[in-house]
Image (cartoon, rainbow, N blue to C red):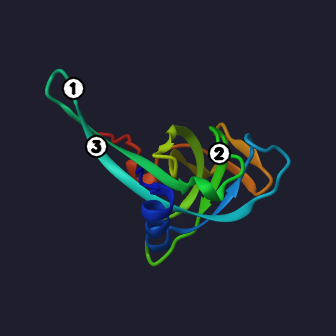
Amino acid sequence: MGVDFATWVYSPCFDMFARSITFTPLISQPGVGAFATRGIFDTNERDVIGMDGSIYSDAKTELDIFMPEWNILPVQGDMVDIPWEDDVDGGIFLVEDCLGQGNAGGELTLILKRVVEAKGVIPSIQFSTGTFWIDSPEFARPKCLLV
């Protein structure tokens, strides 16, 4: 007898840990407006060790979605708006990748890339909600110093 992961595992987990999001299917369903849904949002840090022993720190932002709640699954290029909730980070993201075909038929992991509001003459992406550009946060950019 098999285990129905979608009903017995993923559904209770999503009821407990999922937060509200607004999903805009820019690529998967062009012309369809944004709609409210839910997902489990997480950012995982990882260190990459170079051949010279140096360490490069990076982070991977993920959104798990409950597949039975979706008629058409998201694809690369769709947009997700995750509001700040209970002092936990949020923002506007683009789907960068979709991992696998779902875990045991119930959960799909989306890899997200943060979209930052445009400032000046930087390559930008035009959405109906405004102009955005994809880049690192201000505090993570190196500053030129005169010595």
Which amino acid is tagged 1? Gly
Q: Which residue is drawn at 61% across and 56% down?
A: 68
Residue at the extreme front: 1
When the figure is inspected, residue 11 is found, relative to residue 147, above or below; the finding is: below
Residue 52 shown left or right of residue 18 in the figure: left
Q: Residue at position x 63%, y 50% from top?
A: 119
- Residue 89: x and y in percent read 46, 65
Q: Which amino acid does label 2 sit on?
A: Pro
**Residue sitting nearer the eye, 40 or 56:** 40
Give x and y (percent) for residue 80. Answer: 62, 55
Residue, disc 3: 46
- Dot 1 crowding, Cα within 10 Å, few <14, some 14–19, many 20+: few
Residue type highlighted by circle 3: Arg
Residue closer to the observer: 144 or 95:
95
In the structure shown, which secondary structural element does the residue marked by tag 1 occupy? Answer: loop
SS of the residue under disc 2: loop
Q: How far apart are marks 1 and 2 (CA)?
A: 34 Å
In x, y percent, where is residue 8? Answer: 44, 64
**Residue at 18%, 21% in the rendered image:** 51
Answer left or right for 56 relative to 42.
Answer: left
Measured along the vertical axis of the image, is residue 5 above or below residue 123?
Answer: below
* Label placed on residue 122: none
The label on residue 74 is 2
- The quarter of the picture where residue 28 lies is top right
Q: Distance between the residues labelled 1 and 3?
A: 13 Å
Reading the image, the residue beneath label 1 is 50
Residues under labels 3 and 2: Cα distance?
Answer: 25 Å
Q: Earlier in the sequence, mark 1 or mark 2?
A: 1
Q: In this view, does 58 lie above or below 90?
A: above
Please name which of the two marks, 1 or 2, marks the residue nearer to the observer: 2
